[in-house]
Image (spheres, rainbow, N blue to C red):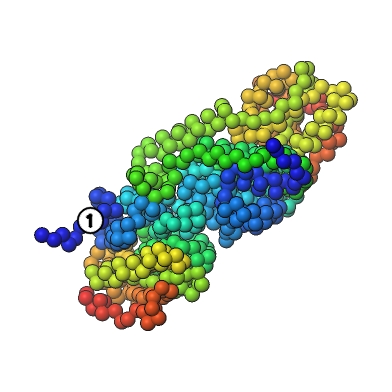
Amino acid sequence: MQKIFARPATLLDTGFHFCPGCHHGIVHRLLCEMLDHYGLRERAVGVPGVGCGVFLYDYIDIDVCEAPHGRATAVATGIKRVQPDHFVFTYQGDGDLGAIGTAEVIHAANRGENFTVIFVNNAVYGMTGGQMAPTTLLGQCTTTSPAGRDSRNDGYPLHLAELLAPLEGVAFAARVSLHTPAHVKKARRALQRAFETQLEKRGFSFLEFISACPTNWRLTPYQSVEHIEKNMLRAFPLGTYKDTGAPASAAAPEEEDTANAVL
Amino acid sequence: MAKRRMMRGSIALAEGAITAGCRYYFGYPITPQNEISEHLSSRLPEVGGVFLQAESEIASINMMLGAAAAGARAMTSSSGPGISLMQEGLSYMAGSELPGLVVNITRLGPGLGGIAACQGDYWQATRGGGHGDYRLIVLAPNSVQEMHDLAIRALHLADQYRNPAMILADAILGQMMEPVNLEPPLVEIPPKPWALTGARGRKAQLIKSLYLADGEMEKHNWKMYAKYQRLQEAEVMVEEDLEEQMDLLLVSFGSCSRMVNSAVALARSRGYRVGHIRPITLFPFPSREIREASRRVGKVLTVEMNTGQMWEDVRLAVHPGTLCRLLARPGGAIPAPKEIFEEIEKFVRAGDHFAENIC
């Protein structure tokens, strides 16, 4: 009998603490599949930011360094400069990367630091209990935008993948989603491109995952998937915004996503 | 065989760091410490190291955190306002027990202040500065030779105790030139089995400062406290210039102590029996030495270029009943040897009423 599905070796055999319907667990799994695929366990260092993703070290069997809130890309810069042949990635949420850590990510990207940023965008501060994030949608109710995000007071959702892609140091920037199995497959391919970018030493790689936070969205897991489909993807278009390693034809924005129809 | 050269303080410090095996520098421009980064920007690549100008001091300290986590000897330098921005990273480094060297060539403060020499960052340096229950190892040179030697010492202590160390100096020490004996490179970096070098042939490792389980953080705080106690027992550095019989003891540190040295010489030439204690480590503070000396003399004059910061540590340290006075010049003013001498003369002759504080 052929085994077609198994836990990646790098993913520790333990239960996730994440809430039901949260997508962090999927990102963790995809990361571990890639670490296994490229045999990177023994030379990988992960740098989680502050947020629900900080417990990365409880689930992924590699060396891990905690970073202060927002500073993961600066910490990763130090680690990578000392060990340029190691595989280094950060794992950051939207508050960590898109608000308090904006300066650090822009400059790490602009220097072309040869590491990978895993950016989990669920449009809300999860760990602190559902406050408005830089990526919160207009009209979205949070604990600090109880009447809905109002651009006149709170500005607009920040588009990190689009913001970083034009920087010359960025070799790969893309946004994917995880709300259907087809999208998870696409996300896996994009993650592979991000890994390859670093392994080929082409510069900064950035992958944004649109992700659900049912607890703080006050939605069921299924409603959250619908919310992503109907609202999140409208505000945050999926696609590859830059891939310096792709053939010219493949670097164009992603084709109309038939996978969206799965729901 | 030591090489003797005429050098500027900032350059001597940078060369000391290289001698100690520091190969990674992360920093952001600020006066009056730019000579350190300018020098290292050409020197580090020569010795196979990395010089990286960061986008802010916040980034600098966190790059240093990362380099330290990867097992390297790393440093940054700045001045007051930049050091304030680094406090977050320093707290995380202390909590994560990561070594590293931070150099503070101080400015005036608070705020943007000015670039003249000042000792107003004593509290920030010795009280931790960032959040939480921690200490920095703080070394205060008073010569170009010590700028060099203490850079080496600070990097060694940081590694040995797994704690960030700070050199607290000022524009006088950074800018002045003096002859220096340069030691040949002596790189003895202790093994760092805790470093994040990839989980090859071992279990995955973690560097963190988050402790959520019940009682975990208290245990960690006591562990760090024990480390600070070991530092207090073993690593105090102090220069003592004492006499058998003394009428007065002076305490000063850093550039200020050079003026005090001159005042002490002047006072002795006029027949006053005075002693001088210069803390070289500000943490750990030479409390025992000050207590012993003050027990014999009864009168202690602290001289500082601030409104009286180290004075608090001196008053905590002195023998009970000691008469204490402070000669303070903040905001870039430098106490002249004659001014210090006049204070010595008054204090020695005066009765108890002249003391500002009886400890």
**Where, by quadrant of the figure, is residue A36 drawn?**
bottom left
**Residue B313 position in % (x across, y down):** 64, 32
Name the chain letter of the residue that bears numbered label 1.
A
Q: Would you place residue B125 above or below residue B235 in this image? A: below
The residue sitting at 32% across, 57% down in the picture is A39
Query: Which quadrant of the rendered structure holds the N terminus of chain A?
Result: bottom left
Number of residues whose C-alpha sits closer than 10 Å to that of mark 1, classed few (under 14), some (14–19) or many (20 or more): few
The residue sitting at 47% across, 57% down in the picture is A84
**Residue A190 position in % (x across, y down):** 34, 69
Report how many numbered discs are placed on residues in the image.
Answer: 1
Q: Which residue is mark 1?
A: A7
**Residue B197 position in % (x across, y down):** 42, 48
Q: Would you place residue B359 above or below residue A169 in this image? A: above
Residue in the foreground of this view, choosing between B51 and A58: B51
The residue sitting at 75% across, 44% down in the picture is B5
Q: Would you place residue A94 above or below residue B235 in this image? A: below
| Residue B88 visible in the current orientation | no
Disc 1 marks which amino acid? Arg
Residue in the foreground of this view, choosing between A172 and A164: A172
Name of the residue lying farthest toward the right? B270
**Where, by quadrant of the figure, is residue A125 drawn?**
bottom left
| Residue A191 visible in the current orientation | yes
Query: Which quadrant of the rendered structure holds the C terminus of chain A?
Result: bottom left
The residue sitting at 35% across, 39% down in the picture is B214
